[in-house]
Structures are given as structure tokens and as C-alpha cells.
Amino acid sequence: MGIKPELLVTPKDIDAVKRLFQAGADAIVIGEEKFGLRLAGEFTRNDVQEAIEIAQRQAKKVYVSMNAIFHNDKVSELADYIQFLKDIKVDGVIFGDPAVLMVAREVAPDLKLHWNTEQTVTNWFTANYWGTKGAKRAVLAREINMDSIIEIKENAKVEIEVQVHGMTSMFQSKRMLIGNYMQFQGKNLEVEKRDKERNLHLFDPERDARYPIFEDENGTHIMSPNDICIIDELEEMIDAEIDSFKIDGLLKSTEYMEVVTGLYREAIDLCAEDRETYEERKEAYLNKLEEIQPEKRKLDTGFFFKETVY
């Protein structure tokens, strides 16, 4: 039997925390928009504490996202938040800005840190460099292929996390581009913070592609037109002992996430324990996911089997 990767998901609220753990998730990523980028939902300090209590009763893990890039005005708030996370015994903090690492060294030197800057973890030297600084995990960029992922894992001295399902970020600006544009046009269409329900898209008619776009406290985010789905291609990564598989639930319902989490739970277990049965069933898993996909959002394999083309 192979070593199973952690199944990591992003719930939108406390109800989703309970339901996704029930569906088979091993760990969750939550946090406050103030500190973390592109979160599925907003979790106050009380929410984070409640999520940790739920997780601890089930031997599950909670990671808090602090992967925003901080300007001077927010740096002074980091120590208090990290101290709070240490006190409630969070299992790890996700960071992109070295300011988080430096503050954590001071106030919570034993806190587990995950290095994640979305696009820049593309080789094992970078992963290991941040390992020497105190990171225990590197979250790989979504733009690298399977061969590179395996090669990084073979040479990494830190845990490796890979996104296996969901949308990915294509662009972020600290500026409120949509709101500024609407204001320039003289249109009374305020783009409210945290309002991901507006369903705004950039539309490319030539490719029939719709890019979800939303604004929050961290600026403007443009997301991929398709969702990654690698449920039928898990063998190489499980054999390479990748440490964590992430399902991103941004802009998805809890009902959708429950089904996806349950299917990946079953697929991971079978791939690790009974490869033959996994090979027989993996097409059925993919078909089930195709059935519940939101209209006009195709599933694809991202960059897993192709080179990055700009």
C-alpha cells in the first residue's frame, strides 16, 4: 500500500467545514481576506477557533492562509494575528511574504509554515531555499507539468503540495480595476468587496472562454476559464509520494465541494491501496465530475501534460 497524500480543501463557512471533513477531507485552508488571497469564504477569529475545535475532534488539520503581499500599514497587524493562531494551535500558516516568516520566527518559532506564492514555486532549489528559512512545505505553481512536479518532489527537502482540482489564478492587481473602470464610465455599478456572487466575467468570444473576475480587499483577481481535474491521473504523484493534494473551492457551492471531495477521497484511497480497481473506476470518477460541473466551465488537466506557453 502506497503512502497517501493529504486531501486538502477550501470550505466557504463553518457548515462547509463539517460537511467536507465528513466527505473525506484531511485538512482545510481558511482565513481572513485581510491576510489571505482568494479564499473560498471569510472566517473571523471565532470561526477559525471553531474550525480548529471541529478538526481536533476528528484528528484533522486546519491551515490558515496569510499569503497576501503586505504593505507597511498591515505589517504591524501580523504579530497579533500569528500569536492568536499559535494560541489556538493552528496546524500551519500559508505565507508568501517574508514578513510573515520573520514575524512568526519571533512570536511563534514552532509554527509550521507553508511557502506559497501561487506562481513562483517552480523548482526544488526555491522550495529548499525557503526550507532553510523555516518553511516546512512548498505549494507548487499551477503552471508546471507532471515531469517537473515529480522531479521537484524527488529533490525537495520540504513537503510538496499540488493543486489537483478547481480554478486557478491567472492575474492579480492590487488596484480595483473593475470599480475604477465603472467609475470612469460614469456607471453606478459598485463592485462590492467579497461579492463573488455577482458572477462577473471577462468573455473571449474567439475561444468561447469566460474568465471569472472579482475584487476584494487585496485588489482585482482574474481566474482561469476552466477547472483543473486530475482525478484520473493520480498514479505518478501518489507513487512519487506527493504530500498534499488540494481541491480549490473558490466560487463553488458546498454541495459541489462535497461531491468532489468524496470522489477524490475514494480515488486517492483506491490508487494507493488497490491500483487495479482504481484503473477500472477512474473514468467513472471523471464522468461523475463532468456531470456536476457548472455550465460553461470545462474540466481540463491544466499544465500537467504540457509545457507552459506564454
Image (spheres, helix red, strand yellow):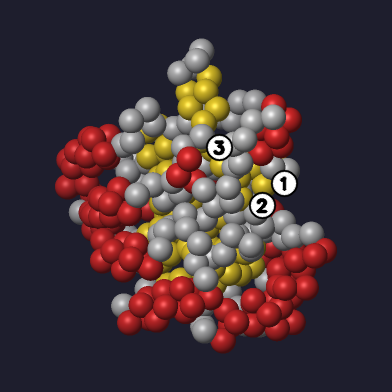
- Using residue 180 as the reference point, say whether residue 88 is left or right of it: left
Tell me the amino acid under the disc marked 2: Asn
The answer to whether residue 107 shows anywhere in this view is yes
Please give the residue where the numbered disc 3 appears in the rendered image.
213
Q: Quadrant of residue 102?
A: bottom right
Residue count near mark 1 (Cα–Cα under 10 Å), binned few <14, some 14–19, many ≥20: few
- Using residue 35 as the reference point, say whether residue 70 is left or right of it: right
Please give the residue where the numbered disc 1 appears in the rendered image.
174
Q: Could you give the CA–CA distance between mark 3 and mark 1, rounded to whole angstroms?
A: 14 Å
The answer to whether residue 109 shows anywhere in this view is no
Q: In which quarter of the image is the N terminus?
A: bottom left
Q: Could you give the CA–CA distance between mark 2 and mark 1, rounded to whole angstroms?
A: 6 Å
Q: Quadrant of the C terminus?
A: top right
Please give the residue where the numbered disc 2 appears in the rendered image.
218
Describe the element under mark 2 as helix, strand or loop: loop
Describe the element under mark 3 as helix, strand or loop: strand
**Looking at the image, which residue is at 75% across and 66% down?**
74
Q: Position of residue 213 (x, y in %)?
A: 55, 37
**Looking at the image, which residue is at 59% across and 36% down?**
189
Looking at the picture, does residue 128 appear above or below residue 259? below
> Mark 3 touching mark 1, by CB under 8 A?
no
**Looking at the image, which residue is at 71% across and 68% down?**
100
Q: Quadrant of residue 143?
A: top right
Q: Which of 151 and 214 is in front in this view?
A: 214
> Mark 2 touching mark 1, by CB under 8 A?
yes
Question: Which residue, as the protein is rendered here, is positioned at the far top?
Answer: 206
Looking at the picture, does residue 298 appear above or below residue 91? above
**Looking at the image, which residue is at 64% across and 62% down?**
34
Q: Position of residue 172 (x, y in %)?
A: 66, 42
Question: Which residue, as the protein is rendered here, is positioned at the far bottom?
Answer: 87
Q: Quadrant of residue 297?
A: top left
Residue 205, disc: none
